[in-house]
Image (cartoon, rainbow, N blue to C red):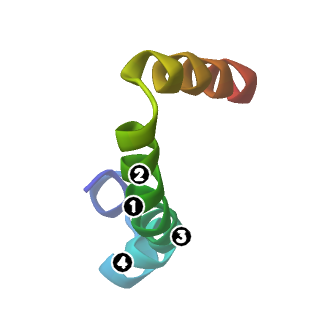
Amino acid sequence: MFMQGVLLMSAFKSGLILFPSGIANGIMAPISGKLFDKLKLRVLVIHGRIIVAVSL
């Protein structure tokens, strides 16, 4: 909505921009689900925070 309303992009361009994140989410969802079943939540939260901190 932001891209189409504020940046005045077409729906097609907005979809192309968001497409890679959708693919990454589709790939990572089963992997993170299996990790969540194997490991404890605390381990995943700690690693997730580290990854977010590094990326920021």
> Which of the two labelled residues, at mark 4 and mark 3, occupies the earlier sequence position?
4
Circle 3 sits on which residue?
20
Q: Mark 4 falls on what kind of element?
A: loop
Distance (Cα) linking label 1 and label 4: 31 Å
Q: Nearer the viewer, residue 14 or 24?
A: 24
The mark that comes first in sequence, 1 or 4, is 4
Please identify, in this view, whether the residue under mark 2 or under mark 4 is nearer the observer: 2
**Location of mark 2 (residue):** 34
Give the Cα separation between the discs numbered 1 and 2.
6 Å
Residue drawn where x is 46% and y is 73% of the image: 19
Q: Nearer the viewer, mark 1 or mark 2?
A: 2
Q: CA distance from mark 4 to mark 3?
A: 17 Å
Q: Residue at x 42, y 67 (%)?
A: 22
Mark 3–mark 1 CB contact (< 8 Å): no
Q: Are marks 1 and 4 in contact (CB under 8 Å)?
A: no
SS assignment at label 3: helix
- Left or right of 48: which side holds 50? right
